Amino acid sequence: MISRELNGYENDVNGSTGKFLRSFFQKATRRRHGHGRVAMALRFYISVFLVMILMLAAGCVPVASEDRVLFDFEEDGDLDRLHWKCGTLYSLSTEHAFRGERSLKMTLYPSDYPGFFPRLDVSDWRGYTALAMEIYNPSSDPVLLTLRVDDDKKTEYGQRYNGRVVAGPGKTSLVLPFDALVTSGTHRPLNLKGIQRCLLFTSTPKSRQVLYLDAVRLVAGRPKEGA
């Protein structure tokens, strides 16, 4: 996966920078008409120059070869990386762990927006292709959730990603490809270099609900269900 910044470099090479180099080459060739060796040398050095620009641009954002785990809930310290708020009770559980031995048990009480409110340690999501996590609903009734992702410190609804997630009875593998990570208002692609928030919550539940969450991660390569 090549970032939008890299695409910008490529566009620049094909655009203004490319036009300048082509103009330079054409003028140099005309001035040295008949000197084949000089023209060939110019072509060679210009080609090397363009290749170096693309290599440097590609090196700015390396493509990830392995998933990046944001939360696996294996350590007690993971609870310190969550924003505790009224209406949500967090605890580590040995039930319904997708990876490792533990999962996060979330007990959601009737309140405005109970759910998963983490402190993100990784804000640069470039080089990955998707956000994924595993949800387990022990109830026989589905739970409607909202997945929210912000790339700005502002909190306007239209300036962030807002997606609906239905956690049916049993396990739900949530996979959000980054090509679908756009704002709700103008459908602007989020800036993967500066992700500010990633929240998963329900809205004003009428009764107590329990959910288990595990393996919150950034996916390398092509996203797959249950990867």
Image (tube, rainbow, N blue to C red):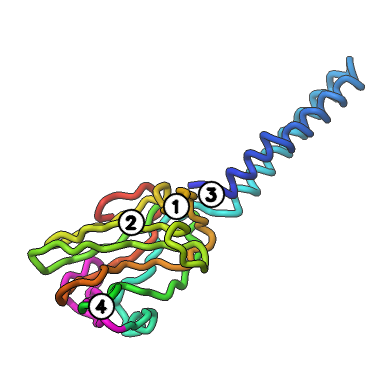
Whichever of labels 2 and 3 marks the residue nearer the N terminus, that label is 3
Q: Earlier in the sequence, mark 3 or mark 1?
A: 3
Quarter of the figure with residue 212: bottom left
N-terminal of the two: label 2 or label 4? 4
* Crowding at mark 4 (Cα within 10 Å: few <14, some 14-19, many 20+): some
Q: Residue 3: which disc?
A: 3
Amino acid, disc 3 = Ser
Q: Residues within 10 Å of mark 2 (few under 14, many from 20)?
A: some
Residue to which mark 4 is pinned: 111
Tag 1, which secondary structure? loop
The residue shown at (29%, 69%) is 201
Mark seen at residue 185: 1
- Residue contact at pointers 1 and 2, CB within 8 angstroms: no
Give the spatial CA distance, label 3 vs label 1.
22 Å
Q: Nearer the viewer, mark 1 or mark 2?
A: 1
* In the rendered image, the vertical position of residue 139 relative to residue 61, given as above or below: below
**Of pointers 1 and 2, the one earlier in the residue sequence:** 2
Tell me where the magenta segment starts and ends, as one range.
86-108
Residue 163: assigned label: 2
